[in-house]
Image: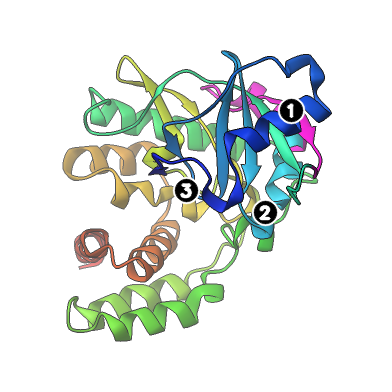
């Protein structure tokens, strides 16, 4: 999630959205179109009046999420303990914009942060409850992990080359030998059960709070069915200390799941040079395995 003070990223701006809405959904043509303050990278999102949003992929790689979310969000929503996006309509390419796009229901809330969450351990329990509920939903016919999910839910081997390259580049700034050990342990662990639902990007920018409590989870663009280890990464990117311990206990996943979760967190932290998360993963590995 990024704050983009100027409109027009990826060739998408409010005027384009107004033209698309007027041409394809004239019933909403008179609604004001305003860029959201905190925007995602994969899509550009605009407030459409008071109750709707327009969500436009910024590149072809993000297009599969439009149909996937439109189909599956209504299936998932009744079984989850907090609100998720409501698919209202799908737009088509037009007005010089080459991709399908989506209209969703606006969800009130503030992005999760250490300032907006009043009780981190309770928040950790709420995230664990969401993960349990998501994993319990019937995955029959769901979208198997793969390219559409950027391989979240698939074996970590897909990102082995990137990880090895990043380890070499950062070898003078991290304990590369220990990081390699963590990565090898992640690769050695496999998901050997039937596929289950995963969100794919449970990160603070996709978590909305009101009065300090979790009230919504957004952006199911990398969701699918497969290995849910990727959904534990928030343990290292948001929680620490007692809140991480609470999350670990509440989510109640086995050692193999945590090995793969550390792999997911390590890969992303390495390729983005997020050394704080790298260190959190390494410290946790030592605590849990020594």
Q: Which of 279 and 125 is in front in this view?
A: 279
Number of marks present in the image shown: 3
Give SS at disc 3.
Answer: helix
Judge depth for marks 1 and 2 and give the one in front: 1
User: Residue 29 lies in what quarter of the image?
Assistant: top right
Residue 37 drawn above or below residue 105:
below
Q: Which of 140 and 279 is in front in this view?
A: 279
Judge whether residue 73 can be spotted in this image.
Answer: no
Alpha-carbon span between mark 1 and mark 2: 41 Å
Residue 146 drawn above or below residue 161:
above
Q: In the image, what residue occupies the spot 36% across and 36% down?
A: 250
Q: Mark 1 points at which residue?
A: 21
Of pointers 1 and 2, the one earlier in the residue sequence: 1
Which numbered disc covers residue 35? none
Alpha-carbon span between mark 2 and mark 3: 16 Å
Q: Mark 3 points at which residue?
A: 231
**Position in image of residue 53 (x %, y %):** 61, 26
User: Residue 23 lies in what quarter of the image?
Assistant: top right
**Position in image of residue 72 (x %, y %):** 73, 36
Whether residues under marks 2 and 3 lie with C-beta atoms below 8 angstroms apart, the answer is no
Q: Is residue 92 magenta?
A: yes
Alpha-carbon span between mark 1 and mark 3: 34 Å
**Position in image of residue 245 (x %, y %):** 24, 42
The region drawn magenta spans: 71-94
Of pointers 1 and 3, the one earlier in the residue sequence: 1
């Amino acid at each position: 999630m990024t704050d983009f003070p100027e409109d027009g990223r990826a060739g998408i701006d409010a005027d384009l959205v107004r033209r698309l809405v007027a041409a394809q959904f004239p019933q909403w043509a008179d609604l004001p179109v305003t860029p959201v303050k905190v925007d995602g990278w994969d899509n550009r999102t605009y407030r459409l009046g008071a109750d709707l949003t327009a969500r436009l992929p910024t590149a072809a790689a993000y297009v599969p999420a439009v149909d996937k979310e439109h189909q599956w969000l209504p299936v998932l929503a009744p079984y989850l303990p907090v609100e998720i996006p409501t698919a209202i309509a799908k737009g088509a390419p037009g007005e010089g914009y080459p991709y399908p796009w989506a209209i969703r229901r606006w969800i009130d809330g503030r992005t999760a942060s250490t300032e907006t969450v009043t009780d981190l351990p309770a928040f950790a329990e709420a995230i664990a409850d969401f993960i349990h509920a998501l994993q319990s939903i019937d995955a029959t016919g769901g979208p198997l992990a793969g390219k559409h999910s950027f391989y979240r839910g698939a074996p970590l081997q897909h990102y082995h080359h990137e990880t090895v390259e990043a380890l070499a580049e950062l070898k003078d700034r991290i304990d590369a030998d220990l990081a390699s050990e963590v990565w090898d342990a992640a690769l050695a662990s496999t998901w050997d059960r039937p596929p289950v639902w995963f969100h794919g990007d449970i990160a603070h920018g996709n978590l909305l709070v009101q009065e300090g409590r979790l009230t919504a989870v957004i952006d199911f663009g990398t969701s699918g069915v497969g290995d849910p280890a990727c959904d534990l990464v928030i343990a290292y990117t948001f929680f620490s200390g007692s809140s991480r311990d609470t999350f670990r206990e509440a989510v109640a996943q086995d050692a193999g799941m945590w090995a793969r979760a550390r792999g997911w967190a390590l890969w992303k932290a390495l390729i983005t040079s997020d050394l704080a998360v790298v260190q959190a993963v390494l410290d946790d590995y030592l605590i849990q395995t020594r």
